[in-house]
Image (tube, helix red, strand yellow):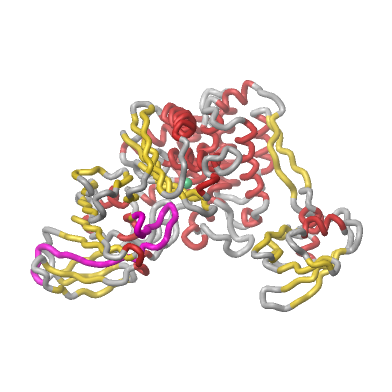
Amino acid sequence: MKYIVSYQNPNNHYIDIEFIIDKIKSETIEVQLPAWRPGRYELGNFAKNVQKWEAFNNKGSILPFKKITKDLWEVETKGASQVHIKYNYFANEINAGSSYLDDKQLYINGVNCFLYLPTRQNEACELELKIPSTYEVASGLKQTSKHNFIAKDFHGLVDSPFIASNSLQHFTFDENKVKFNLWFNGESKPDWKKLETDFRKFIKNQIEAFGDFPVDEYHFLFQILPYRTYHGVEHYNSTVISLGPSYDIMRTDGWYNELLGVSSHELYHTWNVKQIRPIEMHPYDYSKENYTVMGYLDEGVTTYYGDKFLLTSKVFDWEQYTKTFNQLLDRHYNNFGVNNYSVAQSSFDTWLDGYVKGAPGRKGSIYTEGALIAFMTDVFILKNTQNKKSLNDVMKTLYQDFAKKGLGVSDADYKTVIENISRAAYDEIYNNFIHGKKDYTAHLKEALNYIGCDLEIKPTKNFNESNLGFKVRYENGACLVDNIFPTSLAEQNGLAINDEIIAINGIKIINDLELWSEYYKEEEITCSIKRELGTITRITFKIDKNAVGFSDYKIIKQNETDNYKHWLTI
Ligand SMILES: [Zn+2]
């Protein structure tokens, strides 16, 4: 299998791809373009970016073909043993999982745009890039000669995104005998010393926790963008992280903690999901949905440990760590979908609406729910083993006894391994919180108490949230209802999500609804509202000191107990 990538006019964003298939013996071949990309468990429908598609034999004669599905083609080989498919791909999206071309860079996630033969995915793939000679290539792919690469199979090819450009900034260091590469693309001023100091700490900590690193070289590919963005995607021996704005990413009081947070998270994925993988995705089937209930493991445990390793490696202090934990609490308690769908059901349904807000109150987040459940599981194991074992021992076992033996992990395997290590029944968490949707506040409090912390719950300081029961967001100058607390005054009085609040007691709102609602909190409050359909209405809230509403959730450390120290040693 060979892929040749070139382009004519970089600013029209079309990449030309030639896919050469050898050793054909059949009368027809089926050629597939992936429908989704690992890391984002929803359909990407990448074929919508294909404009031209043609098939030829090795003498250049056209071969007939037809489309069988939206992204599957059938070519009549007419006796040819070699087929060339020439097609193009509109690469005009830039995030951590997309492809993009302009006159400054060629950035490809092969899973977006490389065709494959479903029956021959395990054959080696060559890749040739016809790009300016001054371009360097940042990638985990194995280079054979300048701008030529090889992957051991299709999975390896599409699990190795690359950025080709003449303005890449590059820095390397060795940690635990693994070579780490930091690549920065786009307007940015990386502080290598600061990055190296912090990265070494969490990298070392993670490798020591697992015992070894699955690959011998690793690449962090940073796509730095001028606008606010935050996104990371994990790969076999690399990650792409898009972050911005440029001026903020190295600022400790800016976006730098986010850079560390996403980097630690993506590194952890090198074990958890790139090696330890839900059995339903072992191997990946790129042509259709790969349903699994195990998002609580691949994203939940990764979210938990991505942050925890920053604390245990002393990159983050307690205060910085609790910000990430409190954010999880905030997301859990403000998402009423957790009462409707378990995290397992939410995982199954990522294919429908896992990455958008979706219908209000429908589902939970595999990241948030999974991470809080991972924390409770970690403490569950500590508690049942007198602090001798932790969730890390479970992850190590999944790595040694499953991943390294080429086995996927099932939902039942995860429970069994936890029970073997903790020597206790895991049913409560498993039945009630992973597969059930019971409120876990009491259990969470207990787990926090075990490590010397408390869960502090206080009504939020904004009157509209704590008493009237609605939160707002501001969009292009409009004040929109963002969330409504169940059974609150807002719900009882018929306020709706996405209602625009124009005025309070006749005064126009200009990014200051919270201040006006506080100002009028001893009086009746009448909101003038513009509905989504454009109609105008009014809602009056009568004073009710006992009304229910939103709270703030924080963890507070009371004392540094022995248990806390054990929890901290991973
Ligand atoms: Zn992740």
At a point 47% along the width and 36% down the height, the residue shown is 191
The vertical placement of 303 against 347, above or below, is above
Closest to the observer, 136 or 329: 136
x%, y% of residue 385?
55, 25
Q: In this view of the protein, can residue 491 be seen by the observer? A: yes
Magenta segment, prevailing SS (helix, strand or loop): loop
At a point 15% along the width and 69% down the height, the residue shown is 56
x%, y% of residue 198?
49, 31
x%, y% of residue 421?
48, 30
> Quick check: is 80 in the magenta stretch?
yes
Bounds of the magenta span? Answer: 78-105
The vertical placement of 26 against 62, above or below, is above
At a point 13% along the width and 58% down the height, the residue shown is 22
Q: In this view of the protein, can residue 161 be seen by the observer? A: no
> Quick check: is 364 in the magenta stretch?
no
Q: On the picture, is 87 further left or further right than 354? A: left
The vertical placement of 177 against 246, above or below, is above
Q: On the picture, is 388 further left or further right than 40? A: right
Closest to the observer, 139 or 115: 139
The extreme right residue here reads: 523
**Which quarter of the rendered picture does the N terminus lie within?**
bottom left
Q: On the picture, is 213 further left or further right than 545? A: left
In terms of image quadrants, where is residue 315? Answer: top right
The extreme top residue here reads: 562
Q: On the picture, is 218 further left or further right than 307? A: left
At a point 58% along the width and 60% down the height, the residue shown is 357
In terms of image quadrants, where is residue 60? Answer: bottom left
